[in-house]
Amino acid sequence: MKQNRRFGFWILGSWLFLLPLLTAVGQPLNTVSRLVSWDSIPARPATFRWVAPAVLIPVGLALSPDYPNSHFDRFYIRSEIQDKIHFRTHVDNFLQYGPMIGWAGLSLAGVKGRSLPLDRAGIALVAHGITTILVLSLKKITHELRPDMSDSYSFPSGHTALAFTGAGLLDREFGGVSPWIPIGGYAMATTTGVFRMVNDKHWVSDVLVGAGIGLLSAEVAYHVYPWLKRKLVRRKSAMH
């Protein structure tokens, strides 16, 4: 247990060290982010940013049923993982926060993202609110039994959803600073999902849908937040 915790803290510590370093290398090469930084809330996300959740969620749902003698269902994939990987780790409990810690570290370090600092915080709050509502609601509705049969809150993977929410926000805000920043974020989020399956806490369907929810929440937040901000500004103006 102590060794796993040390490993988890080591990973997060390395993440916080590497992000500013990658930023320092990438920022001088970045011209696009300089033009758009600090001006306004980011523009509408590119179409491909919606493709990933649009693929992950249906594929995850398609893998949920038990197809007899099939190599394309969650039961077969789970058996393959458990037969070939023989270790358990608590690192996923730390990795799920990695992308968001990186996002916070870059923000606190004053690295220019694609939106104003206050808007950036508001977008993150909305994104995590959407993720939390979706994940907890689905867990309560589905009562899906975990692979290890420890409880009935398997679907979807909250760890994976949280990790991919952070990775999506990290990509949207700082992807223009250095390509290594979103690569690192998505790598940590993907590793979180893989470890949840290795630890026999989630089916592959839980992880895929969780990843889709996280990415979708991050993108939706960029549409919802401007509307909420306008509503708040109008209410304040009306009060005065």
Image (cartoon, helix red, strand yellow):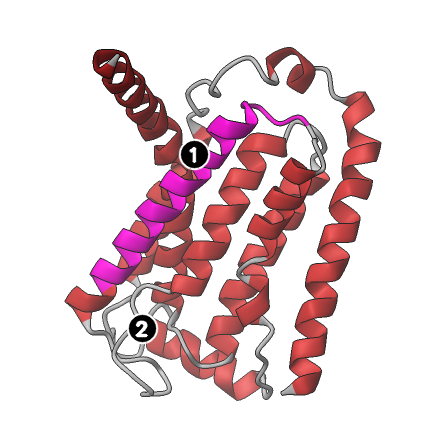
Residue 25 x, y percent position in the rendering: 84, 33
Mark 1 residue type? Gly
Residue named by callout 1: 122
Residue 102 x, y percent position in the rendering: 64, 47
Mark 2 residue type? Ser
Q: Is residue 155 above or below residue 236?
A: below
Question: Relative to the observer, which residue lies in front, 55 or 111?
Answer: 111
Please say whether residue 117 is one of the residues in the magenta stretch: yes
Residue 239 x, y percent position in the rendering: 22, 16
Query: Picture quarter containing residue 147?
Result: bottom left
> Which mark is on residue 41?
none
Residue named by callout 2: 154
Q: Residue at x 35, y 72 (%)?
A: 74
Q: Is residue 165 above or below residue 42?
A: below
Query: Picture quarter containing residue 182?
Result: top right
Q: Label 1 crowding class (10 Å Cα cut-off): few <14, some 14-19, many 20+?
A: some
Q: Label 2 crowding class (10 Å Cα cut-off): few <14, some 14-19, many 20+?
A: many
**Which stretch did the figure color magenta?**
112-138
